[in-house]
């Protein structure tokens, strides 16, 4: 099995978490190392976006 088969993914269209690539890339967030991280995908994404926005503001 490939490493990706053991990783966790969040499906944007259904809100479901799965181990392995079960949905197409256009609706899939991940990979994440744990199921819990995949369940928190939207919060993780928001935090990363806010950090990037803060970095952008500091660079100007």
Image (tube, grey):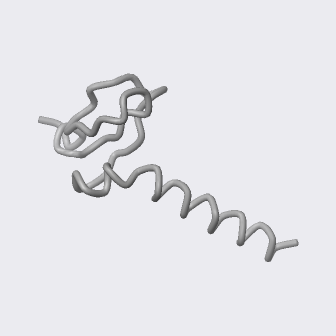
Residue furthest top in the image: 24
Residue furthest bottom in the image: 58
Picture coordinates of residue 32 (x, y %)?
A: 31, 51
Residue furthest front in the image: 15
Front residue (pair 40, 58): 40
Left or right of 51, for residue 14: left
Residue furthest right in the image: 60
- Examine the rendered structure and indicate whether residue 21 appears above or below residue 10: above
Picture coordinates of residue 19 (x, y %)?
A: 19, 39
Quarter of the image holding residue 14?
top left
Picture coordinates of residue 1 (x, y %)?
A: 11, 35
- Examine the rendered structure and indicate whether residue 8 appears above or below residue 59: above
Q: Quadrant of the C terminus?
A: bottom right
Residue at position x 22%, y 35% from top? 20
Picture coordinates of residue 44 (x, y %)?
A: 46, 58
Quarter of the image holding residue 17?
top left
Residue at position x 43%, y 33% from top? 12
- Examine the rendered structure and indicate whether residue 57 appears above or below residue 5: below
Residue at position x 41%, y 51% from top? 41
Left or right of 23, for residue 44: right
Q: How many marks?
A: 0
């Amino acid at each position: 099995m490939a490493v990706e088969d053991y990783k966790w993914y969040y499906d944007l269209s259904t809100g479901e978490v799965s181990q392995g690539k079960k949905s197409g890339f256009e609706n899939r967030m991940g990979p994440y190392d744990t199921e819990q991280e995949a369940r928190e995908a939207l919060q993780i994404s928001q935090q990363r976006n806010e950090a990037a926005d803060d970095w952008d503001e500091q660079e100007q």
